[in-house]
Amino acid sequence: MNVFSRAIETHGDPHNPPIVFLHGIRLGGAIWTPHAHELSDEFFVVTPDLPGHGVLEDLPFDASTLDEFLAYISDNVVLRPPLVVGYSLGGYVAMRYATDMPEQTSGLVLTGSTTNIVGYRWVLYEAAVRFTGSIPQPLLQTMLTAFFRVTLPPSIANVVVPFRFNHDVFEQSLRLAGNIRYSDLLARYHKPVLIVNGKYDVLFRQDERLFARSANARVAVIPRTDHVAPLREPQRFCALVREFARQLFGAGSTAGAGRTA
């Protein structure tokens, strides 16, 4: 059995249009279970653990491993290029993969990932990586657990807390997401893009308009929520993904694929 196959959950009929959900740092494919249940009536939903996370926590979170993993999904799991939904760090993974190999995707939904981590932002990110590296792992896990219990509703905290923080992934993410103007990469991705952000996601909405212009993307802002918008508002988020996927694949509507306005 290929090691990647253990990290991939699928939901629905594989002959339906595929949607691949990519999670953020310190999370796993399980965060998308409610979304998969919501959408699998109409779409084939794939919810993997990314390398460095979950059952693949021993694999490096680097460009070559991510490319190999996503290529495995394209070649062995889905029957046609999927819509890729990328959340937070998963959004940067999705953008890099889609712009490098556009023929492997049908479109993108980006959520919590519309900030270019360059300049002083990269410096702050690097400082955060170094700071967390100085904290013993058990203490850091305790601190994160307390933070999530205070800031998230119990139903969401119960999903997020069990995931283990992998500092190696955090360090590797600096090289993958940092010092790259992802908005510029999107300018050469000539397929449909939808941006969905929580209204109060102050860190990852900073370049939202720039990303939208570069990708000719439609922007949907979910009110009264933040960076965790897809988890706080799963039904609203799924409704946006469903509408976009129908337009993209022509499923459930007469609209065909094309760049969004």
Image (cartoon, helix red, strand yellow):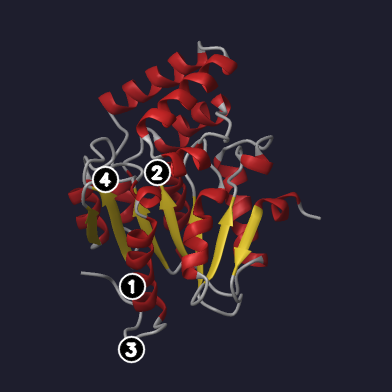
Crowd class of label 1 (few under 14; some 14 to 19; many from 20; radius 10 Å): few
Count the labels in the image: 4
Which residue in the protein does label 3 denote? 254
Front label number (4 vs 3): 4
Q: Does 257 sit above or below residue 212?
A: below
* Residue under the point 39% across and 72% down: 245
Up/down of 107 relative to 42, above or below? above
Residue at mark 4 to residue at mark 1: CA–CA distance: 21 Å
The label number, if any, that marks residue 243 in the structure image: 1
Does 153 appear above or below 233? above
Which part of the image, by quadrant, shows the C terminus? bottom left
- Residue in the image at 28% along x and 48% along y: 183
Residue positioned most to the bottom: 254
Quadrant housing residue 226: top left
State which quarter of the image contains the N terminus.
Answer: bottom right
Q: CA distance from mark 3 to mark 1?
A: 12 Å
Question: Does residue 191 show up?
Answer: no
Q: Is disc 3 placed on a helix, strand or loop?
A: loop
Query: Which residue, given by chain and number where applicable, does mark 2 sit on?
Result: 88
Q: Which residue is mark 4?
A: 225
Residue type beneath disc 4? Thr
